[in-house]
Amino acid sequence: MRRALVFGASGQIGTPLVERLHAAGWQVIAVSRAPHRDRPGLHWLQGGFERLEGVPDEVEAIFSCGPLDGFARWYAASRIACPRVVAFGSTSAETKRGSSDPAERALAQRLREGEQRVFEAAAARAAQATLLRPTLIYGAGRDATLTRIAALARRWGWFLLPRHAHGRRQPVHVDDLAEAALAACAAAATHGRTYAVPGGETLPYREMVARVLAVLEPPPRLVEVPSPLFTAALLGARALGRIQGFGDAAVARMRQDLVFDLAPARRDFGYAPRPFVPTAGMFG
């Protein structure tokens, strides 16, 4: 029986990936910081990259669905024998490398360095690695963008956007990412390569938000205001501690196209993500 080691196994991508591996007959060793109960074919290890006991000496595949930089450090220092590695990074490696926010630029740098470290460590042990870069993730109610927007809109009964927030986006469902990881693992054409894995539909930021609000009950109102008024409202909300994380760079990106080509992933491992059709349960 093939064995897979999965990091971030209880996360929003790891959860559906573990289920697919298990259903496909893999013996799964799943890593999580929280305790979980074993079942036939699925064994949980509790710990993190800095301290993890019980890792097998050999597996057929390693999947990383958590922080890429942490996994890259662990993998480079490990002695595990494994011919195949599939790790998730993020398109933020490109979209935030020129950000006006120093923290975002640092994130982009860590992602790119993590990718390079994974490839170097794989090459040093004659293994084959593939890196997957998702766009804006949704579907498990645990993402930091659309689920957060839904939560704020539910609380307030409305959601504020600056006018002309028409930068294009490609939201990608967690189940499509789990399928992508499995397919990429089995495809020799993906060895040593990095792929963007966007969603199956490209739409303006405003339309994306409007679709999220439309499935909530009752549907919150989408309010569009001039940019100076939006900036003033955002500053006020930050000062009152009512909102965190929507920095100036993030607001500026609402007008920027963040679009990636899925053709290489489709060609090499049959990637076919769904269009953006949200339901309320995706943001619970």
Image (cartoon, rainbow, N blue to C red):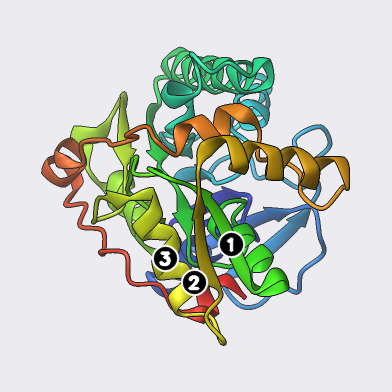
Q: Residue furthest left?
A: 267
Hey, what amino acid is under mark 2? Answer: Leu
Residue drawn 62% across the image and 29% down it: 248
C-alpha gap between disc 3 and disc 1: 9 Å
Q: In the image, residue 1 lies at what x, y percent?
A: 44, 62
Instruction: Assess whether mark 2 and mark 1 are in contact (beta carbons under 8 angstroms).
Output: yes
Q: Secondary structure at mark 3?
A: helix
Instruction: Assess whether mark 3 and mark 2 are in contact (beta carbons under 8 angstroms).
Output: yes
Residue drawn 20% across the image and 57% down it: 272
Residue 125 sits above or below residue 264 on the image? above
Q: Which residue is mark 1?
A: 159
Residue drawn 60% across the image and 25% down it: 72
Viewer-side label of 1, 2: 1
Hey, what amino acid is under mark 1? Answer: Phe
Within the image, what quadrant is residue 153 found in? bottom right
Hey, what amino acid is under mark 3? Answer: Ala
C-alpha gap between disc 2 and disc 3: 5 Å
Q: Which residue is mark 3?
A: 210
Of callouts 3 and 1, the N-terminal one: 1
Please state if 40 lies on the left or on the right of 279 as rendered: right
Q: In the image, residue 41 lies at what x, y percent?
A: 56, 71
